[in-house]
Amino acid sequence: MKTAKCIGIALAAMVALSLISCGGTGGGASEVKLQGAGASFPAPLYSKWFKSYGETHPNVEIDYQSVGSGSGVKSFIDKTVDFGASDAAMTPEEISRVDPALGVQLLPMTAGSIVITFNVADVKELKLSRKAYAGIFLGTVKKWNDPLIKKENPGVKFPDSPINVVVRADSSGTTFVFTQHLSAISPDFAKGPGASKMPNWPVGTRSKGNEGVTASVKTTPNSIGYIEYGYAKSQNMPMAVLENKSGAYVAASMASGQAALASAQLPDNMIVWVADPEPKDAYPIVTYTWLLVYKKYDKSKLPVLQDLLKYGLTDGQKDAEPLGYIPMPAPVVDKVKAAIDTLAAS
Amino acid sequence: MSPEAQISQPPSRWQLLTDVAFRRLCVVFSWLSVLLVAFIVLRIAFAAAPAAAQYGFGFLTGTTWDANKGQYAILPEIWGTLYSSLLALFFGTAFGVAAAVFLSEGYLASFAFAVLKIFHVEFHRIWGKIPQQAENLLRNLIELLAAIPSVVYGLWGLFVVIPLIRPACNWLHLKMGWVPIFGTDLSGPGMLPAAIVLSIMVLPTITAISRDALTAVPPKLRMAAYGLGATRWETILAVILPTAARGIFGGVVLAFGRALGETMALAMLVGNANQISVSLFSPANTLAALLANNFPEARPKDVTVLMYAALVLLGITLVVNMIGAVILQRASGDLEGGKA
């Protein structure tokens, strides 16, 4: 009897609560809520933008879920979000699946480099020629004292032990950009694993995420792996100096990343890959990352979204460097701004 | 009205009503859980159908997973799933049953009692409680292992277990590399660290269930064994363990199910390399890790393939549980010493 009463009261309370919460969301009509999802690589920067923008615009609520580029593109096509984000842009096939009534506009918002990190006892600096690092990730360069590695690092004593290659286990935009670069510099790589978010690597153990690769490299002697520049910087991981297309050896930095970005012309669809930049001072593995927006939005959301995107391109670019991203060159920013202005109300 | 009439009265309408309602509710919920399982299996099967039609049986026997070339096959993952689970079960059962015997036989309590006896406080009103408390503490600690999140186990494996076992593993490979299971060296993540961590994860399941089974053995049997002149060792091995075998085996089967499906810790520790190797030290892959690694970025076409892999994992779990149930039925008849 007593328990039955308790259950009855609990049920009544639940009904009442759900009614109250329904009423709560029904109010506040002037609020604009934008929902985004996608790439995890630029997520720290986007979160910072959305947070500072939300602080100055209390009526705007922006929610970004870093679920990965693939899910971002999928949610964008399914129209379950207001904007998506992807490190691998969108393929023509994916673009064709977007509702033609809405259209799609890709906007490069920031850029980043991918670095090769390593863990070899007593080796602080490592120079890798194009042949050497392509060979390591193809499995043809097997030992640390390989002539290809020794040649560029005179005076460094390498151990006579196998190279433990660590690659990403999960499918990721980082891997896509890295394998795209390897495919550009090595015909064997292009023929073998090829550019992919998760290629069939011929060598190595696979770890999940930047954090997994970093942990594996840190704890495994004689290992090598690839991670994002910002992550490597925050974790104080050593970064190899890489040979670029013009034969110069360049370390990853903001300046060398910008030099690489400046070498590429942004076409009208805003999709450009800097697979193998030419300039002498350019770091070889660099990429843009994109926000995916529709060409048409309803009247309430459009001005807010445009304002938000422009905030990211102006004040927001100042947040890029401390977080390990590369601020975009001014001509690119202007071009993206122009594209934002073409978005229309439906 | 006499007092008796007030104590025993016919149920009121309200009581009858709630009684019936409660019974109906229970029936509905129990059927809902059955329906839920059927729904999950059906949805996965429907989602997997296109891939199943395209890749058919070759999906289970091929060894290449290359999204770029559109080749998908999961034999290395099936192998890795079974190999890692069996290894984990091997370690886990050995340690888990031993721990259960230790707990149920009261070794710790009698040790604590003996220590207290030295100080002549074995029946003291506070100190005297220590033997029982110590045993409870140990039991709770083992069960607490089940409460540690999977990702914590993964990190612990990455930063503690692998560096700890690496020298020993590489020494074994150097000295005994001709033995297939030591055939490669341990660079980082691999089968053995994954199996070790997995065995710790299934330990609480095995220990808790085995302990319950052991304490349920009728005391008469133990007395009879002692009475026939058996030593404690003989009693445990020849009488108590066989009698509890059914329960222990049930725990092992349950642990096997958990080991097959364990995802996060394995994805971090197993190395995720699509290869088949009997070497304990080489990286491998498991079905659950494959799913976890691929889903976030999967394209619609990849999703059907992954669903197919998920269906295979479900199938393996089902088959394992069925085999477990059959062995249980067969074995328990022979092993059980006798019912009280």
Image (spheres, coloured by chain):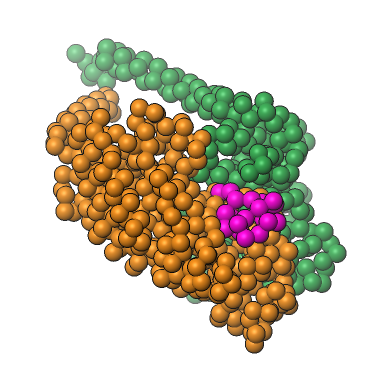
Chain colours: A orange, B green
| Residue A180 counted in the magenta span | yes
- What span is colored magenta in the figure? A179-197
Q: Residue at x 29, y 50 (%)?
A: A337
| Residue A257: % across, % down | 44, 66
Q: Where on the picture, by quarter, is residue B67?
A: top right
Q: Is residue B164 magenta?
A: no
The answer to whether residue B72 is above or below residue A225 is above
Residue A199 screen position, x and y as percent = 62, 50
Task: Name the foreground residue: A216 vs B196.
Answer: A216
Is there any visible trace of residue A252 in the rendered image?
Answer: no
Residue B10 coordinates in the image, percent (x, y): 30, 13
- The residue drawn where x is 52% and y is 65% is A278
Count of numbered tags:
0
Q: Can residue A297 be seen here?
A: yes
Q: Residue at x 68, y 64 (%)?
A: A135
Asked which quadrant contains residue A25, the reply is: top left
Quarter of the rendering occupied by the C terminus of chain A: top left
Q: Farthest residue to the bottom: give it.
A: A155
Residue A332 in the figure: left or right of residue B2: right
Taking the spot 41% from the left edge, 71% from the top edge, the residue there is A255
A326 and A69: which is toward the camera:
A326
Question: Eyeballing the image, is B38 above or below B239?
Answer: above
Q: Which quadrant: the N terminus of chain A? A: top left
- How far across and how far down the image is residue A343, in percent? 28, 39
B31 or A230: which is nearer to us? A230
In this view of the protein, which residue sits in the foreground, B128 or B237? B237
